[in-house]
Amino acid sequence: MRTQYLRQGAPPLPIDFQMHKAGNTWKVYDITVEGVSLVLTYRSEFDAVVKQDGIDGLVKRLVQKNTPAAIGGTSGGGAPQKKSK
């Protein structure tokens, strides 16, 4: 599905969704923004981690990225949380 994100004062941002039917519903498989595929980006990132740290290293990093900030992690590499005094 091809779409465009309309931004005030800027050209439209092309966004494509790759969809697959699963039973009676449709699921998003990949998102491509300005020609950059999310699946291909993650695939190459995961490949680099596996080559460096093995599959256990990849699993460990994914667990860390999915740990909520309230437990001490960050979700998706966000800004560090302020520590209270």
Image (spheres, grey):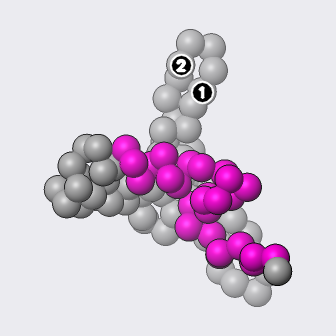
Position of 48 relative to 8 (above/below):
above
Question: In the image, residue 34 lies at what x, y percent?
Answer: 49, 68
Front residue (pair 74, 28): 74
- Position of 61 with respect to 69 (left or right) is left
Instruction: Specify the label residue 51 is tagged with.
Output: none
Magenta stretch holds residue 45: no
Residue 27 visible here: yes
> Tags 1 and 2 in contact by the CB under 8 Å rule?
yes
Residue receiving disc 1: 26
Crowding at mark 1 (Cα within 10 Å: few <14, some 14-19, many 20+): few
- Position of 39 with respect to 43 (left or right) is right
Front residue (pair 80, 50): 80
Front residue (pair 11, 71): 71
Q: Main secondary structure of the magenta part?
A: loop
Amino acid tagged 1: Trp
Magenta stretch holds residue 82: yes
Please give the range of residues in magenta. 59-84
Question: In the image, residue 62 lies at what x, y percent?
Answer: 45, 49
Amino acid tagged 2: Ala
Quarter of the image where the C terminus is located: bottom right
- Position of 23 with respect to 9 (left or right) is left
CA separation in Å, label 1 and label 2: 6 Å
- Position of 52 with respect to 67 (left or right) is left
Query: Which residue does the image show at 49% across and 29% down from the upper left?
Result: 20
- Could you say whether the residue bearing mark 2 is in a helix, strand or loop? strand
Question: In the image, residue 3 lies at what x, y percent?
Answer: 63, 55
Question: In the image, residue 35 lies at what x, y percent?
Answer: 43, 65
Residue 40 visible here: no
Residue receiving disc 2: 22
